[in-house]
């Protein structure tokens, strides 16, 4: 007799419950499980399906948001880097006093662009640069163009908004994933109880007939390597023994 293996995926779990529910609709006279188990399957299935769909939707939303977010991060990094480079050029041309770089939290004697690799760094330097430019121009300094600080701020604000949204998507996906995982244990226990009941119902049938009846109820069997597959002839042999 081949061995059974409980479902490993949520789709397989759903299919297993659908099979036993559909089998039960043929009538209760030959139902291989109790009315309670049948009722539990009919009750739990839509709840589990809802959680799975909910998780899949939030995961897809997160993936889509991450793709947009990646481009937005690229944009703000580019604009911040460009602005700082232009600021440094203005200082080198004596158009802006190098001491004014302190307004941007920049070292007056360092003309490299700060590390903008992480999103935390983008948040920090975005605020420094915007506040610094606003303070310098507010004191009468000529604004930097190409890019203007207004353009930098637009991309910075978009970045912050999408960064917050990304965190919301991640939190929602994690919550729904946990909900599915929690109910998955209940579903696995229910399927095992159903399969145990089905196998017990047909335990006295000859091997091939028993296999087919259990498979009709949704039990999935696998043959071991080298194991001979059951055929109707095995039933005849068993009956003659």
Image (cartoon, rainbow, N blue to C red):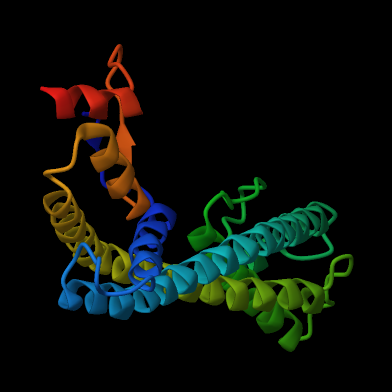
Question: Where in the figure is residue 219, as x and y percent of width and height?
Answer: 30, 48
* Quarter the N terminus occupies: top left
Q: Is 197 positioned to the left or the right of 71 in the image?
A: left
Tell me where residue 184 sits by quadrant.
bottom left
Q: Nearer the viewer, residue 237 or 39?
A: 237
Number of marks: 0
Whether residue 70 is visible here, answered yes or no, is: yes
Residue positioned most to the right: 146
Q: Is 116 positioned to the left or the right of 88 in the image?
A: left
* Quarter the C terminus occupies: top left
Residue positioned most to the top: 226
Residue positioned most to the front: 240
Q: Is residue 5 above or below residue 100?
A: above
Q: Nearer the viewer, residue 50 or 111?
A: 50
Q: Nearer the viewer, residue 38 or 133?
A: 38
Question: Where in the figure is residue 183, as x and y percent of width and height?
Answer: 26, 69
Question: Where in the figure is residue 112, as x and y percent of width and height?
Answer: 65, 45
């Amino acid at each position: 007799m081949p061995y059974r293996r409980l479902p490993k995926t949520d789709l397989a779990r759903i299919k297993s419950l659908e099979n036993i529910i559909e089998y039960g609709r043929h009538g209760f006279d030959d139902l291989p499980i109790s009315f309670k188990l049948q009722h539990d399957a009919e009750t739990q299935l839509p709840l589990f399906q809802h959680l799975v769909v909910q998780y899949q939707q939030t995961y897809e939303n997160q993936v889509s948001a991450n793709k947009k977010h990646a481009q937005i991060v690229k944009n703000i990094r580019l604009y911040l880097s460009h602005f700082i480079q232009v600021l440094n050029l203005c200082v080198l041309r004596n158009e802006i006093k190098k001491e004014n770089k302190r307004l941007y939290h920049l070292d007056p004697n360092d003309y490299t662009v700060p590390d903008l690799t992480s999103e935390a760094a983008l948040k920090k330097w975005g605020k420094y640069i915007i506040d610094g430019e606003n303070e310098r121009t507010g004191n009468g300094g000529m604004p930097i163009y190409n890019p203007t600080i207004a353009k930098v701020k637009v991309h910075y604000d978009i970045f912050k908004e999408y960064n917050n949204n990304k965190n919301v998507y991640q939190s929602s996906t994690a919550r729904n994933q946990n909900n599915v995982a929690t109910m998955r244990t209940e579903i696995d226990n229910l399927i095992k109880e159903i399969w145990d009941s089905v196998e017990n119902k047909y335990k006295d049938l000859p091997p091939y007939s028993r296999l087919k009846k259990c498979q009709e109820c949704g039990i999935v069997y696998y043959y071991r390597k080298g194991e001979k597959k059951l055929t109707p002839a095995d039933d005849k042999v068993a009956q003659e023994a």
